[in-house]
Image (cartoon, rainbow, N blue to C red):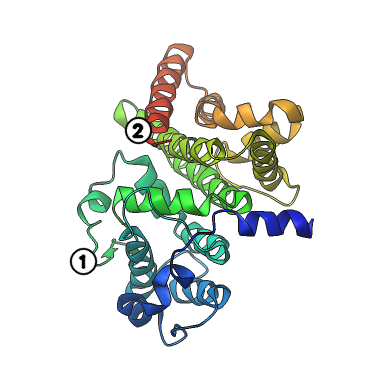
Amino acid sequence: MLGGIGAWLLLGRDTTPPCNGLTENDGVRSSVGQDVRPGMGCQALGEAIVKASAGDTRGRHSLAQAQALKDVLTALGAQGPGRLTLDPALRRPLATALADYAPDLHAMLGGIGIQDFATKAAPATPPWKSGDGTYHLTVLTDTLRDVLRAIAQDPHSYALLRLAETRTAGQSLAAVPADAEGFGLSVPPTESARALGVLDGIADAVTRDLDPSQARTWRAAVLDGLTDDQVTATDGPAPAWLRDLRSTPEEERYESLRAQGVEMTRLWAQQRKVDEQTQQGLLAKVERSALSAYREIEP
């Protein structure tokens, strides 16, 4: 087991500066705080990032917390599109930090009803405050996708983010009013499928760079993270989808993961007792949305 973990930690090392240069970045040192100093270890830096950006028990974030994570992501994105290789010790902490902003991550990945996120993503634009008093994280699309792809080199970190999106998608679908119709009915599942489609594309982009044995090991680690008996979800179709994934024959689970957006929508429509014609129309839209998002990810 330790040997396997060591192999994943070594994967992707290159000549980038220690800790991706974050300990030398003035913006990061200012917003993450006094715990960041030149020459510190990357594990300690990751812990400092999580500590500085984590919200309260209700998932609410202050301006300083959201700004800390935005500055870190922006600094990483400045390395150039498609060029990011994260120090292995930063992958799990960054996944943990992003998972704490799961609704924001869902909105950035889903990319449909997110005007506030799209217009306030510029590096110099501070996190924005919503009516409930919480501040929201938003970064440029290329920055987010590059960081996610770099995090996903570690399958356990990818599984953490995938689970966060699964729970948030379930919450989003559960929140749809009973009398919703038209766009009010179709946007939430379509947005969720788009977010999951991006994650599918990132998974394939990562495993394309691995040999067949490594790719199988990566996929197995992701599925282990999602099918662990301690993994739970409470809202909408997410609990049922996780149960179905656990009961799927092991050799078929990864393909089931690829169909998650469609299957969660199907479960949700059945829970709502949506008529067959409407349900089929929704499923077709959701499938197109997931496929379109998947194809946007560069191999």
Which of 90/223 is in front?
90
Question: Height in image: 213 above or below 231?
Answer: above
Report how far apart the C-alphas of labels 2 and 1 lie in the structure: 30 Å
Question: Height in image: 120 above or below 262?
Answer: below
Query: Mark 1 or mark 2, which is nearer the start of the sequence?
Result: 1
Q: Are marks 2 and 1 in contact (CB under 8 Å)?
A: no
- Measured from the top left, where is residue 145 in percent x and y? 39, 48
Label 2 belongs to which residue? Answer: 187
- Measured from the top left, where is residue 151 in percent x and y? 51, 54
Question: Height in image: 261 above or below 160?
Answer: above
Check disc 1 and report its element: helix, strand or loop.
Answer: loop
- Measured from the top left, where is residue 172 in percent x and y? 45, 43
Q: Residue at x 52, y 35 (%)?
A: 204
Which of 132/69 is in front?
69
**Amino acid, disc 2:** Val
Q: Is residue 55 visible?
A: no
Question: Height in image: 55 above or below 248?
Answer: below
The image quarter containing residue 283 is top left
Q: Which mark is residue 124?
A: 1
